[in-house]
Amino acid sequence: MLHVFLKKAPFLRIVIPFIIGIYSFGGDVDSHFAIALLLFVIIFYVLFVIWYKKHPLYHWRWLHGFIVFVILLLSGFVYHQQRPAEFIESNSSVSAKVLIIRELGETEKSTRYLVKLHAINNDSLHNFHGSKGLVYLSKSKFSERVLSGQTLLIKGSFISFQRPLIPYGFDYLSYLKNQRWHFGVYVSQLKQVQSKKGHYNLFVLSAKLRTYLNEKYKLYGIGVEELSVLNALFLGDKSDLQYELKQKYSSAGALHLLAVSGLHVGIIYLILSSFLKLFLGKYRRLLAISLIICLWVYAFVTGLSPSVLRASIMFSILEMGRLWGRQVGVYNLLGASMFLILLIDPLTIYNVGFWLSHCAVASIVAFYSSINKWIYFSFPPFRWAWSIIALSLSAQIGAGAISIMVFHQFPIYFLLSNPLLIPAVTLALVLAVVGALFCWSGLIMSLLTEGMSDVLFYMNNVVTWIDGLPFALQTRLNFEPIQLGLFFLIFIMIYFYLESSRIKLVFATLFITILFVLSFHCNRALLPQRGILMSKSRSVLLVNYFNDSVNEVYASKAIANDEIKFLFDAYWTKYGVKHEHQTYLACNDSDSLLTVKFVGDKSYFIVRKKLVWPSKGLTKPVECAAIMYANQFENDSVYENIALRIIDSKESDKIFYHAE
């Protein structure tokens, strides 16, 4: 049955081993050896085909598929190896010429820009010419914002981004590498130079178009908060979106509406198709070509995210299929989309949007029809509302488990938010597209922006209301990779049962479900009962201690609770820490003990700031908090036989960790 399914979707048979090959990439494997092995297998396959034609033995037919699988796997491995993630990890100074592509957002102290490197004063880095990276401009030094398309001569220093000091924390350096952003520079001096090259850069043109439309919407009266939502759901720009509002959309299960995805591209596709048919309805080829071009222009304007790439590729293939009178299977379309995106950039495989988009569409195709038949309403509005709920349920089957594994949270009221918000999103996108087409007319823009403001205001009020409902967002949820695999296997079995009604699949599904449930119990039994972790955020030293009843964080200086939660949340989720943290500050006493925590057979002493050691006449000032442990704890000899490890400002990249 699986073989028949894959026969109908040949691109899935290609992309699955290709993905396995990319995932199995190892930097320690010599590239020449990998290429030689791939060539050897290809030559062996050619010889085998020649031999098989002369000696067509039936029992050797399986070898064709196996060798092709190995070739595709090695191809993915080699392709990833030839296009690795690179980043300039240096603290040295630099002088460079860069082209400003677009602004990415700002913090309290600086503004961040995406740039393209045109020249650099370091010959050893000449291979990075033409690469993209980040520059940070201090607000105190550079009050005027630079614009997309400007060419700058900059002086500054490379930023060396650290790996996360806390286990399972967000790895910003890996994120930059996987985006193929190759450097970060904190600018100390800059000078603008005249250059015409920037005007011919496609990404700069798309950024300028985004800025132009944004200014038009702002000019005709859309409020700041509403405009930030419009920029996110139409133009793919979330740089102005406030953190609090973003969290409300997340709690309401509507954050996907603010990320330009297949839903948005589908709505844009229908709007453009209806509009272009008015002028090109008689010219099928010209209509299809114009529609494909418009879709890809929109994809570039929104930043070519994996979900937008997936939707644009699928709609483009559908249009070409219609033009040539051919039907294309959706699963085959998904396989083709995944393969083409990975050919463009194999690092996209590490982008969660790539997986969320494809898995959501696959599960919609697999389960929407069956779920929609559960309930039938004769009243059209109820029937329409149920179709959206069925769509949301089927999409969550594919995307929900991945979201839990990556983000460790799940919105309870997503079935409520989607029927209330999707019509508003559709209307907002229709008005935004019409506004983009008629942005030259002040009268039309004035009429449109008033309606857009009301729709966006309604959306923000809906998510605020849902966010206020009890238990809106469940956090600290965790799926291990094996649990994710079992979850998907359960629904694959259900899908094949719906297709074939074989009773054996019911028993297989029950067996896998039991394994899935048992995996949670096993994981819970293996979690540590107590643990202690020491790390540093900026100049604040943090010590976390947890057991089955407490979760304590000791800080050398005052630090916001939201920052502590951001740093430790993934770690607490992984180790099943359910209690909310309590923060304690170290006082200024120089030689007294702060607290004692017991983990296993060892006693951990969390000591105060600026401790002076009295042991054996040794005096050593410590400029930040430290952890000591001893095999035995005796009041009379606190400092005797102590094994010590100090983490100070010079050793901030080290972690002291113990859990049992």
Image (tube, rainbow, N blue to C red):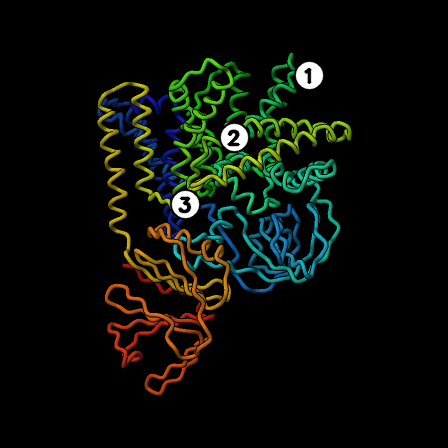
Question: How far, Cα to Cα, is label 2 from label 1?
Answer: 26 Å
Residue 262: which disc? 2
Residue 279: which disc? 1
State left or right for residue 298 relative to residue 562: right
Dot in front, 2 or 1: 2
377 relative to 493, above or below: above
187 relative to 209, above or below: below
The three-letter code of the residue at mark 1 reads: Phe
State left or right for residue 156 relative to residue 573: right
Which quadrant of the view contains residue 429?
A: top right
The three-letter code of the residue at mark 2 reads: Gly
Of 190 and 617, which appears nearest the observer?
A: 617
The percent position of residue 399, horizontal first and vertical second, equals: 42, 35
Question: How far, Cα to Cα, is label 1 from label 3?
Answer: 51 Å
Kind of element beneath mark 2: helix
Instruction: Residue at 31% x, 79% y: name it.
Output: 639
Circle 2 crowding by C-alpha within 10 Å: few under 14, some 14–19, many from 20: many
Instruction: Residue at 53% x, 62% y: name it.
Output: 90
Kind of element beneath mark 3: strand
Mark closest to the chain's N terminus, 2 or 1:
2
Mark closest to the chain's N terminus, 1 or 3:
1
The three-letter code of the residue at mark 3 reads: Thr
**Residue 349 appears in the figure:** no
Residue 475: which disc? 3
Kind of element beneath mark 1: helix
Residue 160: which disc? none
Which quadrant of the view contains residue 205?
A: top right
The percent position of residue 348, horizontal first and vertical second, equals: 47, 41
Instruction: Residue at 45% x, 35% y: name it.
Output: 413
The percent position of residue 447, horizontal first and vertical second, equals: 73, 28
Q: Are marks 1 and 3 in contact (CB under 8 Å)?
A: no
**Residue 380 appears in the figure:** yes
